Image (tube, grey):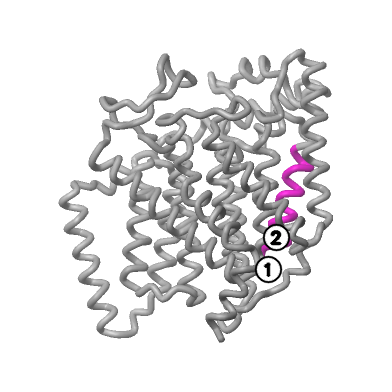
Amino acid sequence: MKNNHKAISGRKHGKLFLYLLIVITIIFPFTNLFHILYPITLFGKSAWAAVPVIIIGFLYLYLFVSKRSKLLTTDILLVAIMTLVWMIISVREITYNESMSFLDARFITTSLLFIMLTRNLMNNSYTMRVIAYAVIIQGILVAAARSINYYFFPYVMVSYKGGLGGEAYINTEGETTRDLLIASSISANIIVCGMFVLLVLMRHNITKLGNIPFLFIQFFMMLSTFNTLSRYPIAIAIVFFTLSFLQVKLVSLKNILSITIAGMALLILITLLNIEFFQFFERFNMDYSSRVDKFEVVILLITNSVVDFLIGSSSALVNSTMVNRVLISDNSYGMIATTFGVPFALVFFIFLFYVFYKIKSDNISLVFIFYIVIGLGITNSILWEPWVFTAFLSFGVVSYYGRVSNSKCNSNLSFNKIK
């Protein structure tokens, strides 16, 4: 009876629907690399990045065509915000005599599309479990790719002809950098999402993974964030690994002995790979003042004039305004405010966080919201479509299992309160 229930539950979204969701989730972090190896364009953009987004859009529409999800106020607001973006782009073109393609502003639509798709998938336990495992597999694969690249082939990396912004190519004779073949900050934050989802599955007894394999996987993913040298995800990964260690019950001699042996094996492996832990934390001693300067740039831009406040600043002004020789960067809130205006930025983020708030369940899901909110404030991560997709799916998984009790994890639930 239990297996029959799973089969029925799984057919709710269809096998093809789930297969596409799994494949996109797993390959999304590698799409930029695929484009460098096999460049294919669509609408002037990388087809490797565009096609997954288009498929996600069709998956979202499928939920309504199949009459398995009803149209809600938030769905209507999504269309309204998309229309507002198009209007602002048109006004900017007239005001500043500069052209901006709607595709250049697609991150506004895609970020909302990702969270709305997640919300509409949260009424099916089988689907949420499939997503959870896909996110974990994605995190492990990204961690493996980062570690293999960093420890065994550090001279193989993505470089740009003529400097950053030029044509990208695979450099097999490069000097060790943070990014290598996969962008450091994006990959580190994707790994963090995998760690969080795996921790939640263990907390709610969704997976039968043993304590030792669980800690080993979490340690491996945490270690893989270290070589990215991205401070924020490193700090979050350490917190998650600590919570993972506390999750394991050391009540038996067998568990204590097993963890001790596993710890010694890891120490031997670290020694053989010549991994120096403390070198990864040297970046925490670096000056943080540049981010303050970047925030000051945002203030200068949005207060430059009423027009800059309402529809954002011109590209020429954004590229020339500096504080202590620092341009605007690493602030998703400021980037949207200076590109589309403060009123739109408020509408966009209020709507986004409203959906987050309606989806959230327990304190663990609230922690995930804080992780996303802070990350948006100290990076331009709203542009990282693979991470945004993974983070929003992960948030849905965390919130879903926080909403159900352990005894009801295999039941279909209706999230009627998410309007």
The structure residue drawn at horizontal position 37% and vertical position 50%, both measured from the top left corner, is 143
Q: CA distance from mark 2 to mark 1?
A: 7 Å
In which quadrant will I find the C terminus?
bottom right
CB atoms of marks 2 and 1 within 8 Å: yes
| Residue 333 percent coordinates (x, y) | 66, 38
| Residue 152 percent coordinates (x, y) | 23, 41
| Residue identified by numbered label 2 | 120
Asked if the magenta segment contains residue 359, the reply would be: yes
- The amino acid marked with disc number 2 is Asn
Q: Quadrant of residue 322?
A: top right
| Residue identified by numbered label 1 | 123
| Residue 301 percent coordinates (x, y) | 70, 24
Q: Secondary structure at mark 2?
A: helix
Camera-nearest residue between 239 and 203: 203
In the image, is residue 233 above or below residue 320? below
The structure residue drawn at horizontal position 67% and vertical position 48%, both measured from the top left corner, is 58
- Binning the other alpha carbons within 10 Å of mark 2 as few (below 14), some (14 to 19) or many (20 upward) gives some
| Apparent side of residue 410 relative to residue 202 in the rendered image (left or right) | right
In the image, is residue 359 above or below residue 390? below
